[in-house]
Amino acid sequence: MKLVFVHGAGGSSLSFYYQLRHFRNSKAIDLPGHPTGKACVSIEGYLEWVRGFTTARRYKDVVLCGHSMGGAIAQLYALRYPDELRGIILIGTGARLRVHDDYMNRCASPGEDNAVWMDGQRDYYQGVESDIYQVLMRRSTEVGPAVELNDLQACDKFDVMDEIHNIDLPTQVMCGSEDIMTPVKYTDYLGSKIKDARVQVIAGGSHYVQLEQYQKVNEQIERFLSSLK
């Protein structure tokens, strides 16, 4: 099995820092524009890019783990190309990802030297350990507000609520109990619509639960992978 991680809007492979350290031979993708190359303008565009990435490397028995926007990509992959996946793991995501104007506006009007936008980035990562926090902030600066805005606009158009019941792959869904960007009700909805989905709400975690409560997240991923063997 090949465990492949896909990050969220404006993020990077660093979103899965602790997962990469824990799961040997796993791969975390940097989507185009994060920070190199040109970002895709839709979830469909990112899906095709990810599919090209995994196909070119001849990955077999792929378990796709997506956070936030990455979770949208994973859902779409499972709906369009189920035969190419062994299972999916959805972290802090939803079948529809309406984005609050505050997040959009902060990217569209980032302030002098991006100061307003940077405050928002600090908010995202406030629950993360200090060593990785600095690295995440540096990477955020490299990706920048324009790419995050592009991604948030793609998320805002994403809606598979009418299709989600068609996913017929082993699925693990999880989120942090304090996630305000993709709240627990999103996870509950996915769990209720996807057949036999495993659902886990991780106490105290926010939107970046895989960085904040990484031991608990890794434990859930391990259990899920064991169930596929």
Image: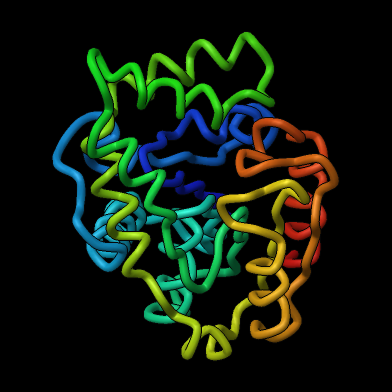
Q: Residue at x 71, y 31 (%)?
A: 212
Task: Say which of 78 and 93 sits in front.
Answer: 93
Q: Is residue 59 above or below residue 15?
A: below
Quarter of the image that includes the N terminus: bottom right
Q: Residue at x 58, y 16 (%)?
A: 132
Q: Residue at x 43, y 54 (%)?
A: 100
Task: Say which of 91 and 111 sits in front.
Answer: 111
Residue 220 as seen in the image, left or right of residue 168? right
- When asked about the image quadrant of residue 133, the answer is top right
Residue 82 as seen in the image, left or right of residue 57? right
Image coordinates of residue 188 in percent, x first then y, are: 72, 72
Q: Is residue 101 above or below residue 156?
A: above
Image coordinates of residue 39 in percent, x first then y, are: 20, 45
Task: Say which of 115 and 214 sits in front.
Answer: 115
Task: Say which of 39 and 228 sits in front.
Answer: 39
Image coordinates of residue 32 in percent, x first then y, are: 24, 42
- When asked about the image quadrant of residue 76, the answer is bottom left
Q: Residue at x 80, y 56 (%)?
A: 201
Quarter of the image that includes the C terminus: bottom right
Q: Count the marks: how many?
A: 0
Residue extending furthest toward the left: 38
- When asked about the image quadrant of residue 128, the answer is top right
Image coordinates of residue 58 in percent, x first then y, are: 36, 56
Q: Please, which colouring scheme is shown? A: rainbow
